[in-house]
Amino acid sequence: MIGKIDHIGIAVPSLDEAIPLYEKALGLECEGIEEVVEQKVKTAFFAVGEVHLELLEPTSPESPVAKFLEKKGPGIHHIAFGTDNVTTDLRVAAEAGVQLIDSAPKDGAGGKEIAFLHPKSTLGVLMELCQKKA
Ligand code: CMX
């Protein structure tokens, strides 16, 4: 069951340029940088209360984030919902007629399992389901 907004993903061309902006202009602290090979991104997380911001830099021209930057430029890329069971929530979304990008969870940043719903079937919002691994 979805219980919270876990994080908001923001596409940036360069973490080296983006991190100082969030640190200096907003006074936030970068919790760490992590590469997620399967998603072809490097991530940087900032806590803002209960929610995190996830800056996303593509690591390859084939990265979904590289395509997004090319088409739309930097900006909000996805909203991630925290859940206690990604697999169940994928089934519920599919039964509700939503197109799944991932039919099963994959490895994400921060030791989480993640899966995406297609923005074409969620009124233009790329949605992620994520669950802390047991
Ligand atoms: N939010 C909203 N709409 C988006 C989008 C986004 N982030 N990315 C693409 N779209 C839209 C496009 O604008 C396009 O719409 P139009 O047809 O109206 O122009 C449509 O979706 C198809 O997009 P596309 O450019 O042709 O791109 P692709 O089909 O190749 O890929 C998507 C789109 C969402 C399927 C792909 O980006 C994907 O699989 N994403 C999930 C994985 C991911 O994003 N990983 C990176 C983050 C990983 C992490 O957080 O760890």
Image (tube, rainbow, N blue to C red):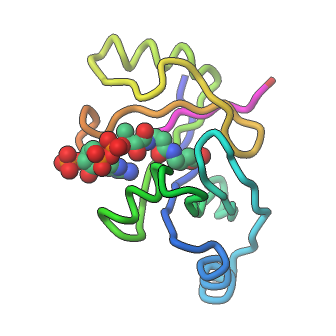
| 72 displayed left or right of 112 | left
Question: Is 87 rendered above or below residue 47?
Answer: above
| 123 displayed left or right of 128 | left
Query: Does residue 63 appear anywhere in the picture?
Result: yes
Q: Is residue 86 magenta?
A: no
* First to last magenta residue range: 127-133
Q: Position of residue 3 (x, y in %)?
A: 57, 33
Q: Is residue 132 magenta?
A: yes
Question: Is 1 rendered above or below residue 33?
Answer: above
The residue drawn where x is 56% and y is 56% is 60
Question: Is 61 rendered above or below residue 23?
Answer: above
Q: Position of residue 95 (x, y in %)?
A: 33, 11
Question: Is 108 rendered above or below residue 69?
Answer: above
Q: Position of residue 108 (x, y in %)?
A: 66, 39
Mostly what secondary structure, the magenta segment? Answer: strand
Quadrant containing the C terminus in the rendered view: top right
The residue drawn where x is 59% and y is 43% is 39
The residue drawn where x is 45% and y is 49% is 64
Q: Position of residue 133 (x, y in %)?
A: 76, 28
The residue drawn where x is 60% and y is 84% is 21
Q: Depth check: 33 or 1 in front? A: 33
Q: Depth check: 35 or 78 in front? A: 35
How many numbered discs sit on the rendered protein? 0
As drawn, the residue found furthest toward the front would be 61
Query: Does residue 127 appear anywhere in the picture?
Result: no
The quadrant holding residue 104 is top right
Quadrant containing the N terminus in the rendered view: top right
